[in-house]
Amino acid sequence: MRYLLLFTLGLALVFAGFYDGNIAGANTNQDATLAVAPSAPAAGDTLSFYGCGYAPGEGVTVVVTSPYAYSFFGATASAAGCFDTSLTETFTALEAGSYTAEVYQSNAHHEDARLEFTVT
C-alpha cells in the first residue's frame, strides 16, 4: 500500500511539472481578429497584419507560414486592444501560393486568431 501511495504521488508530481496552466483551446481573446493589407496581395508585395480584440498594452506574436518559410515578428496592442505590424515590421511575400498567418497572445500553444490567404 505504501508503494502504491508513493507511486501515485510521484506520478502526480510528474504530471504537475508538465502542466503549464493552459487548458487546450482556452484563449482569453475569444473575439480577436486578424487581417492582412493589402487584402489581395501579389508576389513581391509588402504585407502588414492588423487586428483587434487583444489585451491592451501586451505584445502579440504574428507567425506567417508561406510556401518557402516560417516568419515570426511582433507588435504591441494599443490601449484599444488593436495592433498593426506596419508600425513595427512588415513581411514581403516573395512568391505566389497559400499563406497562413496566426496571432498568439493569451496562450502560447493556441492561436488567438488565424487567417488563410492567397498571394497571386
Image (spheres, rainbow, N blue to C red):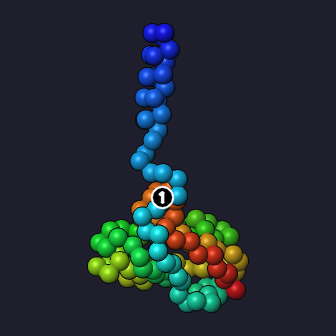
Residue 105 pos. (x, y %): 42, 64
Name the image quarter holding residue 81. bottom left
Residue shown at 35% from the left, 70% from the top:
55
Question: What residue is pinned by disc 1?
Answer: 26
Q: Is residue 94 visible?
A: no
Q: Are there few (<14), some (14-19), or many (20+) residues within 10 Å of tag 1?
A: few
Furthest residue to the front?
A: 1
Residue 28: percent from the left, percent from the top? Answer: 42, 64
Q: In the image, residue 95 lies at what x, y percent?
A: 67, 79
Splitting the image into 4 quarters, where does residue 73 fall? Answer: bottom left
Q: Residue at x 45, y 16 (%)?
A: 5
Q: Residue at x 61, y 72 (%)?
A: 100
- Indicate left or right for 117 with 46 as reference: right
Element at badge 1?
Answer: loop
Q: Residue 35: tell me if it is visible.
A: yes
In the depicted view, which residue is nearer to us: 82 or 13? 13
Q: In the picture shown, does residue 110 fall above or below 77?
A: above
Q: Is residue 88 above or below residue 9?
A: below
Looking at the figure, which quarter contains the C terminus?
A: bottom right
- Say whether residue 58 is left or right of residue 45: left
Callout 1, which amino acid?
Answer: Ala
What residue appears at the point 58 percent right and 65 percent down from the top-left corner? 70
Position of residue 67 in the picture relative to residue 35 (left or right)? right
Residue 98 image-quadrant placement: bottom right
User: In the rendered image of this protein, does residue 103 appear above or below residue 3?
Assistant: below
